Image: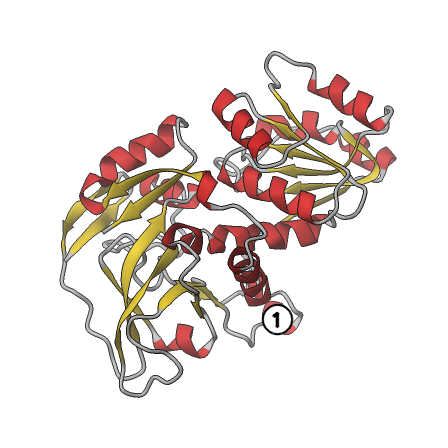
Amino acid sequence: MKAVILSGPNDFAPGEIEKPLIGDHDILLEMKRAAICGTDIRILEGTKTKGVRYPSVIGHEICGVISEIGKEVTGYEVGEKVAIANVIPCGSCPSCLSGRENACMRRKAIGYEFNGGFEEYIRIPEIAIKSGNVIKLPEQVSFTAGALIEPLACCIRGLKNAGTGFNDVVLIVGAGPIGLMHMQLAKIAGAKQVIVSEPNPMRRQIALELGADKAVDPVTEDLAGIISDVTGGLGADVIVMAIGVPALVNSTLKLCRRGGTVNLFAGFAGTGECTIEVNTIHYNEINVNGSTAYKREDYLQAADMVISGKINLDRIATHTYKIEDFQTAYEMCKSGKGLKIIIEP
């Protein structure tokens, strides 16, 4: 079968591998859509190596149809459309026991310990099925939206950490796929105004289509002045950094109101080191937090939002490529000319 084989850092290509054999407790998924994540790009380039195997198949934003079921598996049928929550917490480490299964210290994940979505057929192991990580979807949910439930779940975790709520002025820094999800979630949470900062005109336009109140070009416009005008000089209540550029952290902190929150959502380049004026945080009592992965409850909530039509994920997907055209898909991701790039069989 066709798959994108990762042999090492910057060493990946479409090729042929054996179709997975499943055990009595496994499911074989026929991949219909798998989306490329920014994390996938860092894995492909070798800037992220933790948990990565060589050779392997990555890809963790997955939706497909059940092709085979192990004879001991119950509750699922061949032909059902399902999405996969790829993160499988251990349930017993200190993080899990303290309610932070998203930060599980011994978690396993499809696309890491188990082969992921950039292949025609994926073995979904027993551990994922028993953990409730295989989510059935109705016909009206597209395969693309099903694949994007996973990053939406991550954004829901970020929104909860940021505390976005009623009547807030929210600034989203970056209008890539993640920023556009955060923007929609902030509106759903009751934010009074959601402002998006994004230099790419195509992305600003889509942000406005999806409900942003303002889409600002930080290169040609005075973002700080706009935030000041909107908030009466107070600053944004919540800021979500949906782009991992360390050099932007310090200037972003200065846009937050006293007692507000800055959520460093994106994975940052390199070690993420940056220089900040800590007095901005100290004297303004700014809450700075991060966000990693998602809890299974976040994934289920994301799936419910997609099933009920409360959020538009299909508009965020701009390009679709076959497995054999993965190099072109990768280059499109790197170019910034698209948003979410989708792989199909």
Name the residue type under label 1. Pro
| Direction from residue 221 to residue 228 in the image, left or right | right
**Residue at 60% of width from left, 19% of height from top?**
217
Under circle 1, the secondary element is helix
Figure quadrant of residue 279:
top right
Furthest residue in direction top, as rendered: 220
Q: Is residue 174 visible?
A: no
Above-or-below relation of 296 to 112: below
Q: Position of residue 172 (x, y in %)?
A: 64, 34
Furthest residue in direction front, as rendered: 140
Choose between 313 and 29: the one closer to the eye: 313
**Residue at 18% of width from left, 43% of height from top?**
324
| Direction from residue 262 to residue 87 in the image, left or right | left
Residue identifier under label 1: 94
| Direction from residue 35 to residue 178 in the image, left or right | right
**Residue at 40% of width from left, 31% of height from top?**
338
**Residue at 37% of width from left, 26% of height from top?**
335
Choose between 254 and 272: the one closer to the eye: 254
Q: Is residue 299 visible?
A: yes
Choose between 105 and 236: the one closer to the eye: 236
Q: Position of residue 179 (x, y in %)?
A: 56, 38
Count of residue discs = 1
